[in-house]
Structure formats: C-alpha cells, structure tokens
Image: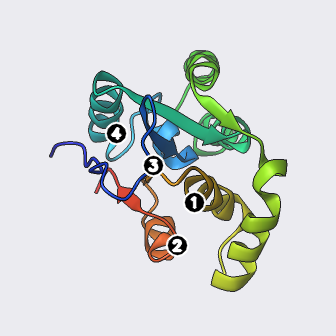
Amino acid sequence: MSCPRMKTVGFPTHDKLRAVLDASAIIKLVLEERGSAEVRKCVKDLLKGGYALHTVDLALVECLNAVWKHARIHGDLSLEEAEGAAKDLIKIYDALQILLARDIAEEAFSIATGHNVTIYDALYIAAARQLKVPLYTADQKMHEVSKGLATSMLLGF
C-alpha cells in the first residue's frame, strides 16, 4: 500500500506541502507494531515528496510513555531497547515542526467536548485544522472522529 497523499486542491499554497503526524503514527517509526512498516514507508515518501511534518508538543510525552509501557508493563522491550527507542524518538521529534498545545488548546477543548474524544486526540485534530493540512494517524478511532473536522489519513490498517 502506498502512502495516501493529499492533492493540493483546496489547501493554501505554501513553499512546502505539510502534514500533521499524531503519536500513534510517530511511535510506529521506532517500535515494531502492526502497521509499523507502512507508517515508515509513508513518512519516508512524504519527506521525499517535500512535505514538512508537524506534530503537537504533547507527542513526545505520549510516545515516551508508550515506550515505557512496552518495557515496564508489557515486558516486550528490554530496558536497553527502550532507551534506544527513546533516543530515536527524541531525534525524530527534534526534526518535526512543533505546535504548542497552548496555541490550539481552546479549539482542542471544543473538539474534545463536542465529539467525546480525549483532549490528547483533539489536539492533533485541532493542529490539522489550524494548519489546514491532513492528519496522519494509526488510530482508527481518531480517524473516525476527525471525519468532518479535518482531513485524516489512516495508516497501518
């Protein structure tokens, strides 16, 4: 399966095409999970296509927590593997364009309360809306909730 890309019709013209990645997509860049290979290929294709990739500042915390869970709760990562994954996540995060949760908090809260979705998920939807770009997610529930709010691309399924 190839990476779903948005046509530029209907989006403002910028020096670069842009997209928002949520934590469910970012974590698949460093961990072997269902759909990881597809997400890696998609992100690689987006970068080759000249896309600037964005996320919300919360993404690093969410992803680090997921690595911690794999190491300490699920036990499917050694501490050494988890430390390597954490370092890789920080490198990836540093390469992304970061939107501050504070800057989109009001819209995110409105989305969360109006659509019965967590504020965490609502932040990514609000980011995509603010930038007027697609949201790339590996979270089927977020993909469904974002319909009608933002353009969403479901990866890894």
Task: Point out residue 117 in the picture as x, y percentages from the top left corner.
Answer: 65, 74
Confirm or deny contact between disc 2 and disc 3 (CB under 8 A): no
| Mark 3, residue position | 12
Asked whether residue 76 appears in the rendered view, the answer is: no
How far separated are the C-alphas under marks 3 and 1? Answer: 12 Å
Asked whether residue 132 appears in the rendered view, the answer is: yes
| Mark 2, residue position | 149
77 left or right, relative to 62: left
Task: Point out residue 134 in the picture as x, y percentages from the top left corner.
Answer: 43, 53
Give above or below for 74 relative to 95. below
Q: In the image, what residue type sits under mark 2?
A: Leu
19 left or right, relative to 39: right
How far separated are the C-alphas under marks 4 and 1? Answer: 22 Å
Q: In the image, what residue type sits under mark 4?
A: Val
Q: Earlier in the sequence, mark 4 or mark 3?
A: 3
Give above or below for 26 relative to 147. above
Query: The residue tagged with tag 3: helix, strand or loop?
Result: loop
Q: Earlier in the sequence, mark 4 or mark 2?
A: 4
How far separated are the C-alphas under marks 4 and 3? Answer: 25 Å
Query: The residue tagged with tag 4: helix, strand or loop?
Result: helix
Which of the 4 quarters of the picture holds residue 118?
bottom right
Q: Earlier in the sequence, mark 4 or mark 1?
A: 4
